Image: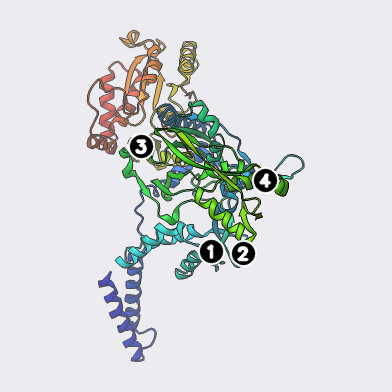
Amino acid sequence: MEEAQQRQKAAAEEVRRLKAEKKPKDDPELVAAIQNLNKIKEEIAEMSKPIETNPYVKTRGELDDICKRRFFFRPAFDIYGGTAGFFTYGPPGAALKANIISLWRKHFVIEENLLEIEDPTIMPHEVLKTSGHVERFNDFMVKDTLQEDKFYRADKLLEEEMENRLKVPTITEEERTRYTKDLTAADSFSREELGAKIKEYGIKAPETGNELTDPYEFNLMFPTPIGPSGLLQGYLRPETAQGIFLNYKFAAEQNSDKIPFGVAQIGKSYRNEIAPRGGLVRQREFTQAEIEFFVHYKNKNFDKFKSVYDLFRQHLPTEMAHYACDCWDAEIEVSTGWMETVGIADRSAYDLSVHSQKTKVDLSAQEKLDAPVSVDVVYLNKKAAALLGKDFRQDAPIVKSFLEGHSLEESKKLQEEVNSAGSKVVTIESKEFTLKKEHCVFEYRVDTRHYNNYTPHVIEPSFGIDRLFTAVLEHSYYARPQDPDDKEKIVRGVLSLSPSVAPYKAIIMPLDQRIANNAKYQSMVEELRMQFASYGLGYKVDDSGASIGKRYARNDELGIPLGITFDFDSIGQNDSSGSQEQEGSVTLRERDSCTQVRLPYTEVVDVIAKKQNASDKIGDGGKAPATQVEQDYAKKHRITEIVNEAIAATLSLKPDDPIAHIAKLLAEKSAK
């Protein structure tokens, strides 16, 4: 780059020299000098283009095409034009998502012996005001100054600008450090800091290039009235966690009031995102899977976390939510960049404390002390307590709780202050009360305690199921090598989903329509249907008139791990010698390697049920799996694919010498 800039400087000086000599515009020497300068400028511009290093960006378009065409998911309300931030999962997508949730439930709820609840998705205003969401669940928004119907989330604009600048290969190390720092801190900047950064980097409205307003707060909750009067204000819940906190007391009773224990909830949450984008990454309605581990405040260790510690990034203090004192994120790289998929927050005792204080319901836990302790107890005398009821009426309980919450020293100090001044104004739960000396008459006693009451702290792992769904798709997609003879250059996409999450575990296919119309085939398929149902395994039947190769390809797009193919041997209609031994057998094809084995159709569902482990490949004969180098070599040269095509063609034609016929087809393919 430096050498090119030097050449540009010299070329520009040459153009200036020639112009200074009053050379005419059509002078060959001047024309050549200008052309040389422009060529160098183009060269520098090309060198300055951002370099895309994200491996998932290149295939995003192909994957999006499959997802839409095969109805994994698509924009909701599509026939009405759609609404940003809402998506509908189609049959394969809904099945894949359900399988991901099932695995999550097995891994966490069952393995960790968690309790699980299901809470309403609408919450009253008072609950979310107490939790802090009404006042503090905000993002910073900016608007296009000339087109005020265009809104943007300020920190995301800054992040995108920094990501683009970091891709430019000509930036200095000083610039790289600055851009990286601002990228990391974007969602922790204050309103003023974000506004300053937007001006510093000259960030404009992406769609129009117009100036942006200063950032301002926007609450992300969806309000909704409850009941026909509309007087009870509610919100669609912004997280599943609050329902767990509200039911802590009842869940603890089911756990014999023993600490620690965990409660899980999987369900929909809602956030009125300013600018939803990135497909399923940032939606207005999404699925969360959250766990609240209730623990002793002095013991927050979880040994299993050590095995995944390196996958998490700790938040900066300014990045954390209002309820958290520590946060760790696991991020997965996808086509839109590094995507937060799992967040682990130490919510301390915040939620239980605020809900207990508001409702006056005890949400504490109890531990037995090693030895009894003596404690000073502060309480109001009977006359003072009675006077509170007379003077403060319905507010008397909160004033009494406030006064009796003082320590021995604090109560004596308060009593002295009120006696000296005659009265004192105090604020309790945002309301002011005037205390007189008659209200502050305390009595004291010493109690012996064998137990200690404390408010449990909460460690919260929170999973975005739709984001996991996105990561699974992007990390499992690949395209088979192009066939040099394919004039249409069709992209043959494959979703290499593991059997445990694949929406369908197998595809059942007849070799052609002659098989599909055969009564014996239909009877055998009916048996397979019942066996799949008995195992609870999803499957599909593809008996369309397309070629067997095209049917394999389109079911590879669905991520179906195994294909069951019925041919003429299967139904006992192959006249070649030895065909009777093959009657009632089928071929079982593995999606990624295209390996095929033959086995009795009565055994195939049992085999598939046992092959739910993605690493357990069919047809390995007990041998060690191929190395990655061998697999890459086979894919590059399409070895298994070409051999399987030759076998399928031979089975269809049934020549007298099948081996010779296969050899001939392979030789013809090689000659091409």
Q: Nearer the viewer, mark 4 or mark 2?
A: 4
Q: Earlier in the sequence, mark 4 or mark 1?
A: 1
Contact (Cβ within 8 Å) of mark 2 with mark 1: yes
Q: Nearer the viewer, mark 4 or mark 1?
A: 4
Residue drawn at x 42%, y 55% is 317
Contact (Cβ within 8 Å) of mark 4 with mark 1: no
Q: Nearer the viewer, residue 368 or 61?
A: 368
Asked which secondary structure carries label 4, the reply is helix
Q: Quadrant of residue 40?
A: bottom left
Q: CA distance from mark 3 to mark 4?
A: 43 Å
Residue that mark 2 sits on: 147
Q: Earlier in the sequence, mark 2 or mark 1?
A: 2
Asked which secondary structure carries label 2, the reply is loop
Q: Nearer the viewer, mark 3 or mark 4?
A: 4
Contact (Cβ within 8 Å) of mark 4 with mark 2: no
Residue that mark 3 sits on: 302
Residue that mark 1 sits on: 205
Amino acid, disc 2: Gln
Residue that mark 4 sits on: 396
Residue drawn at x 60%, y 60% is 420
